[in-house]
Image (cartoon, rainbow, N blue to C red):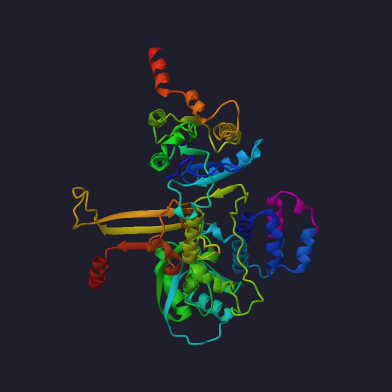
């Protein structure tokens, strides 16, 4: 079970990207390193949680967890849902987010409603961006880096729990549509 | 008539290859070739060039269908994947340790072909890379004009029981087999269920059956000759997919990926796999699922056919394992494809196969 506060903070911030194989985690990590970051960045990628126990001692404190879902593959959402059970709930206070890839694809194996439902329950931020497209991936990378900057506590203006207030409640959105 | 055939065969080649093919062909002398090179037509359109070559050849005395057949074989050697080749095995041979004579083989083939087919049928042979490439042109007495494939191409490696054959009509099949059995002095020609377009891979699978997968490293001499010495380091084939090793990015599942790669290397080896375009499974198995019992009768075997098609099926299966899309360890009917030297498999329950064999 990964916990945000069970280890001492280090100079380098660490972000964990969780997603099924082939979704684009490594490419996203490379893009994140390309963006300008005024702090030191350490990126870890994993196929699913729980993480292998052998390396638990070497692992740094994880400041942010990013779950990547490929909406065209049925396994992707299932893996993320199962992995969320192995994460401590304190990550949901602004230290975790969902990235949904390939939304523009007409073939979807998971309906968007189930993703919204999950995001609402855990008040997670959802970022939409195709990780196979260079510009969109770069945009997602920049957004993740700035979110990490805030949730790792390196910015004076805010801290991780303030991000919870910025999360869009999808239930409200759908109400607006039905009202129109 | 021979000129028409010649034009047709050369016309199929690419313009850049034509000159090299003509140089290999023993029919034209070097003066003819230099005359051709210096002429203007070589830069012009292909049709003119082909016509020019046909003119030069028809003026020669010994311009016959056999020489044209040799040219056709040379054109085929450039791109053997134009035809679909199937492998056959010569069994129960009476020859023992006789030296192989290609000229004698050609004469024998011509003689036996004349017995079963029209006497105007011809045989052309060429030696290439340790094998004999043969073209049997079976002419039809009725029509005089050129007709689409009446030729059967054969590849034989001397002193091995392997023959590769291209497609032929069912009507001539029996006679053709009899001709081959007489020529090679064997009693039986059995079909190995191995077909494909890539000749080198087919030959490798058929002849090196016991040296596939992980054992291919012995064939390519990738094993250290003196394992106890510390001098020569082991040369490994460089991994094709080496991701950018950034020190800031670490993968948590590195251990699992390594284990997966080790398992696959143990089964398939690190060398490139032989190219097969199609792998066919005919499945005749009984329904075995214990949960959904209502779907099918567990006593009656279900027949279905599963085809894997692609530019290189075995490499694809290996990649599926590498990406994590296939659960490892892979089932034996996929891992043993290379060592069984077959494309077309029948998967049946054990009892069924035994009873079928007994009935036969």
Q: Residue furthest front?
A: A8
Res B276 visible: no
Q: Main secondary structure of the magenta part?
A: helix
Judged left or right of residue B118, residue A158 is right
Q: Over which residues does the magenta segment extend?
A: B38-55
Location of the N terminus of chain B (image quadrant): bottom right
Q: Nearer the viewer, residue B141 or B150?
A: B150
Relative to A169, does residue B357 appear above or below in the rendering? below
Q: Is residue A131 depicted above or below B85 in this figure?
A: above
- Residue at 43% across / 29% down in the picture? A123
The C terminus of chain B: image quadrant: bottom left
- Where in the figure is residue B340, as x and y percent of width and height? 42, 68
Nearest the camera: B64 or A79? A79
Q: Is residue B19 left or right of residue A179?
A: right
Is A160 in the magenta? Answer: no
User: Going 53% across and 61% down the picture, which residue do you hit?
Assistant: B198
């Amino acid at each position: 079970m990964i916990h945000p506060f069970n280890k001492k903070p280090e100079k380098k911030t660490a972000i964990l990207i969780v997603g099924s194989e082939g979704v684009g985690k490594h490419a996203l990590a490379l893009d994140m390193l390309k963006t300008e970051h005024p702090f030191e960045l350490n990126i870890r990628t994993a196929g699913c949680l729980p993480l292998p126990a052998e390396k638990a001692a070497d692992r740094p404190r994880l400041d942010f967890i990013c779950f990547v879902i490929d909406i065209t593959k049925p396994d992707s959402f299932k893996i993320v849902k199962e992995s969320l059970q192995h994460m401590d709930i304190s990550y949901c206070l602004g230290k975790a987010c969902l990235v949904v890839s390939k939304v523009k694809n007409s073939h979807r194996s998971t309906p968007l409603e189930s993703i919204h439902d999950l995001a609402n329950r855990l008040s997670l931020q959802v970022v939409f961006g195709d990780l196979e497209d260079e510009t969109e991936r770069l945009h997602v990378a920049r957004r993740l880096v700035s979110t990490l900057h805030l949730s790792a506590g390196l910015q004076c203006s805010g801290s991780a729990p303030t991000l919870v207030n910025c999360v869009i409640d999808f239930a409200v959105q759908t109400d607006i549509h039905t009202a129109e | 008539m021979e000129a028409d055939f010649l034009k047709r065969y050369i016309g199929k080649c690419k313009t850049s290859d034509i000159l090299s093919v003509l140089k290999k062909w023993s029919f034209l002398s070097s003066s003819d070739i230099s005359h051709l090179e210096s002429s203007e037509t070589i830069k012009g359109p292909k049709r003119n060039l082909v016509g020019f070559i046909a003119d030069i050849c028809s003026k020669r005395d010994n311009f016959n269908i056999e020489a044209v057949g040799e040219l056709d074989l040379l054109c085929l050697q450039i791109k053997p994947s134009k035809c679909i080749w199937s492998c056959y095995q010569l069994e129960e041979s009476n020859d023992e340790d006789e030296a192989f004579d290609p000229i004698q083989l050609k004469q024998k083939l011509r003689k036996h072909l004349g017995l079963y087919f029209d006497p105007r049928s011809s045989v052309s042979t060429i030696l290439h890379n340790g094998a004999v490439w043969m073209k049997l042109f079976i002419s039809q007495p009725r029509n005089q004009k050129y007709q689409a494939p009446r030729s059967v191409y054969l590849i034989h490696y001397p002193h091995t029981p392997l023959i590769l054959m291209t497609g032929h009509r069912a009507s001539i099949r029996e006679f053709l087999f009899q001709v081959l059995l007489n020529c090679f002095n064997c009693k039986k020609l059995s079909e190995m269920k191995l077909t494909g377009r890539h000749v080198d891979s087919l030959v490798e699978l058929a002849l090196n059956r016991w040296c596939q997968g992980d054992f291919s490293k012995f064939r390519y001499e990738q094993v250290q000759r003196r394992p106890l010495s510390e001098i020569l380091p082991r040369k490994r084939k460089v991994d094709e997919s080496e991701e950018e090793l950034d020190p800031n990015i670490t993968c948590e599942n590195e251990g699992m990926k390594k284990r997966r790669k080790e398992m696959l290397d143990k089964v398939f080896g690190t060398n490139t796999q032989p190219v097969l375009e199609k792998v066919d499974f005919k499945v005749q198995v009984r329904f075995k699922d214990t949960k959904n019992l209502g779907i099918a009768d567990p006593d009656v075997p279900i027949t279905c056919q599963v085809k894997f098609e692609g530019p290189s099926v075995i490499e694809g299966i290996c990649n599926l394992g590498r990406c994590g899309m296939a659960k490892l360890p892979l089932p034996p009917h996929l891992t043993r494809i290379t060592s069984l030297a077959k494309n077309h498999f029948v998967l049946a329950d054990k009892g069924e196969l035994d009873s079928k064999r007994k009935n036969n």
